[in-house]
Amino acid sequence: MKKRVILSVLAVAVLVLGAVSFANSRNVSANQNPKDIVGVWEVDADAPYRPHLFSFHADGTMTTTNPTNVQENPQQPHGGTNDSLGMGVWRVEHEGGKRYIVGTFEQLNAFADNHQPTDKLSVSFKVQVSGDDFSGPASASVGAQTVPSHLTGTRVEIDEAAVDAL
């Protein structure tokens, strides 16, 4: 009888611990991948070319793009550079009672004239989301040079008037 009681208590304890563990893992997952940043954003950055488009995915990855050929310049060696689609990662951080989205994305660069690789661009950011907008500091590194920047984003939404006119 005593053995049955002990086994019953252990079984209940295992079930409770499993339920608590499952609930905590769901909270961590929801906290790491909040829905408020997920989507497509038009982003203005302190950069020589603008705007950019950022797409934040629920799995903590992101993509970014900017206008084609904006870094080409016949006056520069090799005619300037072209960059790739940017790809990166993001997560949620809490600091001083505030919630931030932090991340880093990279773009590969190649010379415009001979298409040979050159220094990649790496951008790290820390933004706060407020409804359909976000804003925050960033830093951009190309090779050994790092410069401060700032990102301001506005969510891209369906143009209901255009859809209704179809």
Image (spheres, rainbow, N blue to C red):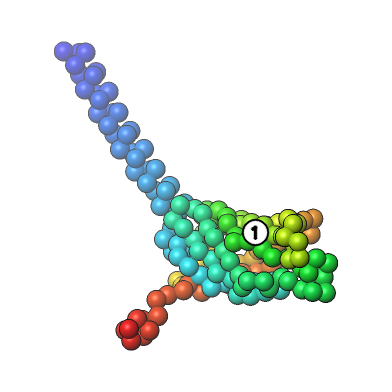
Q: Answer with left or right where residue 165 lies relative to residue 106.
A: left
Residue 13: give x, y in percent of width and height.
29, 28
Quadrant location of residue 119? bottom right
Residue 77: give x, y in percent of width and height.
83, 67
State the quadrant of the N terminus. top left
User: What's under tag 1, amino acid-wise?
Assistant: Gln
Which residue: 65% across, 59% down? Answer: 107
Looking at the rendered structure, the number of numbered marks drawn on it comes to 1
Up-down: is 72 above or below 58? below
- Does residue 133 appear anywhere in the picture? no
Q: Answer with left or right where residue 2 lies relative to residue 143.
A: left
Residue 101: give x, y in percent of width and height.
54, 59
Q: Judge the density around disc 1: few (<14), some (14-19), many (≥20) Cα neighbours within 10 Å.
A: many
Point out the residue furthest to the left here.
1
Q: Nearer the viewer, residue 26 or 39?
A: 39
Up-down: is 23 above or below 114? above
Say which element carries label 1: strand
Q: Answer with left or right where residue 18 lies relative to residue 117.
A: left
Which residue: 61% across, 57% down? Answer: 105
Label 1 sits on residue = 107
Quadrant location of residue 161? bottom left
Q: Answer with left or right where residue 100 lies relative to residue 149.
A: left
Residue 3: give x, y in percent of width and height.
21, 13
State the quadrant of the C terminus. bottom left
Point out the residue furthest to the front here.
114
- Does residue 4 appear anywhere in the picture? yes
Which residue: 79% across, 55% down? Answer: 144
Quadrant location of residue 78? bottom right
Q: Nearer the viewer, residue 26 or 117?
A: 117
